[in-house]
Image: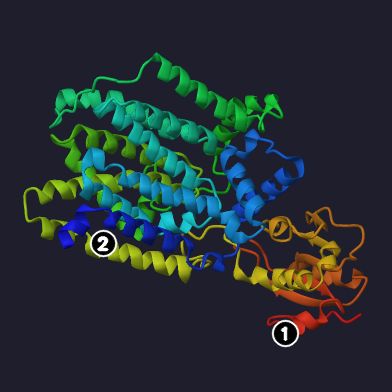
Amino acid sequence: MRARFLQGPGPDVAILLLALLLRVWLLEIKPPHFDEGINGWFVDQMTATGYYRYDPTNYHGPLHFYALFLSQTLFGRELWALRLPAILASLAAVWALLRFREFFGTGVSRFAALAMALSPACVFYGRYSIHESWQVLFSILAMAGFLGMWQFGSRRAFFTLLAGVTGLILTKETYVLHLGCMALAIPVLWLYQIIVPSRPAWPLAKQQWTASHVLVGLGSACLAIVFFYSGTFHDFSMLAGLVKTFEAWFATGLQTGGHEKTSFDLWGPLNWYWISLLLRYEWPALLGLASCIRYMAPSDARLRYVAITASGVLLAYSIIPYKTPWCIISMVWPFYLLLGGLLKELAGRFRQGIVWSFPVPVLAGSLAICLNLNFRTFTDDSEPYVYVQTYGDVNWLVDPLLESVRRDPSLAGMTGIISLDSYYPLPWMLGEFTRVGYYPKDAPPVRWDADFLVIDSSRAAVIEPQLARPYHKIPFRLRSGQEECTAYLASPLFDEILQRAPNFQPGPER
């Protein structure tokens, strides 16, 4: 019975269900992240204009925004709907790793998929409405397509490679980094093969695709790129952004932009930030990185290629000074395959049960970290993965406002003033309110008179004497790196709602 279960689809289904559970359970306990608020705001603009106007200085492709637009159109302006496309992409990435059984065997692919299913980073950022889960998915498809062309030469592999490359181009400008490392790994592998030949070598298979397949594949890829980057054919001038984006990206990537990470900095720009994250959170990936040493000796050429590509991507991200922690999920997945490949090799030499049980404590530790991070410390600034994350305090402002609209939909037209240097994700969270003005601190409104206001608490002593009516005063923090804020909700409009809400102070009395 146990043997039949292991040989059937049961373990694959169990891995996917585990991945799904970790990505959807208590999905809305974490407030919208700064970037989620921006992405949601872009979708609101799409709802108004009918298409996404691509901005090359936004450093991200249009695909994710159209996925968000579809989700929000179907299911409404709900936080879970905003996060649904990224969750599906993250889940599809786990499924895609299971497809690597045709290259490395069932045990390797299942181990890699399980490691990704419960990875603290892949779960944490898979529950965010950001682009990175798409990048992971398309990177995996590109690798699977390349290996398929190498080993089988099939038409399916050719189209899988094209789909992966096209998806990367539609997702994020860093596609040049990932595709560049995949391309450079080919001559590096060839040269290394001369010095230390692989075992087995896996020569290039006879290719089964033809010129007509190339024409159809490239034509479809170009059509998809033009379709999305032109705003579904609304403005073809935006296609120039495909090139212009790199001007902005290189300027950002070669500078820190406030996102420098210098922990464990030993060799100037080449620092150990990503390794420090692997040490803290991603133990299976760390062991996979260490297993690259094995592939320097005679070994499977395909795994050696994966090791060269993965090491190149990690090196490239280490050199770039601009670092945001969610990029880690684009680096870790190949190391799961590499560790799985090493375990399979050891299982062929020693007792399989012992070898495959060796990573169990590591995976259990990864799961424990994952659960703690995603369901307990998800807004704790001491966690490096918790980066410019909105605090739960924001609900002290948002909940009374949304409750008022639930009671009386006409209150969506109430007036609001938000005067902060950085106010996202509030524009998306308060998107139902049609008469809210957003002002930077150095350009305040002419008159402080609205149904609700939000300011930096340091300006309260100056602004409160200018208030035109009495308000309830609610101090809160929006996120790290930003001073305390104060919300003012007009009395008597919010009296009844706030009487039943904690953490508010009445005043100022006028």
- Looking at the image, the residue that sits furthest to the bottom is 499
* Left or right of 273, for residue 492: right
Q: Secondary structure at mark 2?
A: helix
| Colouring style | rainbow
Label 1 element class: loop
Amino acid at pointer 1: Arg
Q: Please tell me which residue is depicted at 41% across the width and 50% down the height of the picture.
A: 273
Q: Whole-percent x and y of residue 314?
A: 37, 41
**Neighbour tally class for label 2: few under 14, some 14-19, many 20 plus, Cα within 10 Å:** some
Residue at left 11%, top 60%?
Answer: 354
Residue nearest the viewer, comparing 184 with 267:
184
- Residue 390 visible? The answer is yes
* Residue 265 drawn above or below residue 380: above
Vertical relation: 319 (above or below) 488:
above
Q: Earlier in the sequence, mark 2 or mark 1?
A: 2
Question: Label 1 belongs to which residue?
Answer: 500
Which three-letter amino acid code belongs to the residue tagged 2?
Val
Q: Nearer the viewer, residue 147 or 17?
A: 17
Residue 362: assigned label: 2
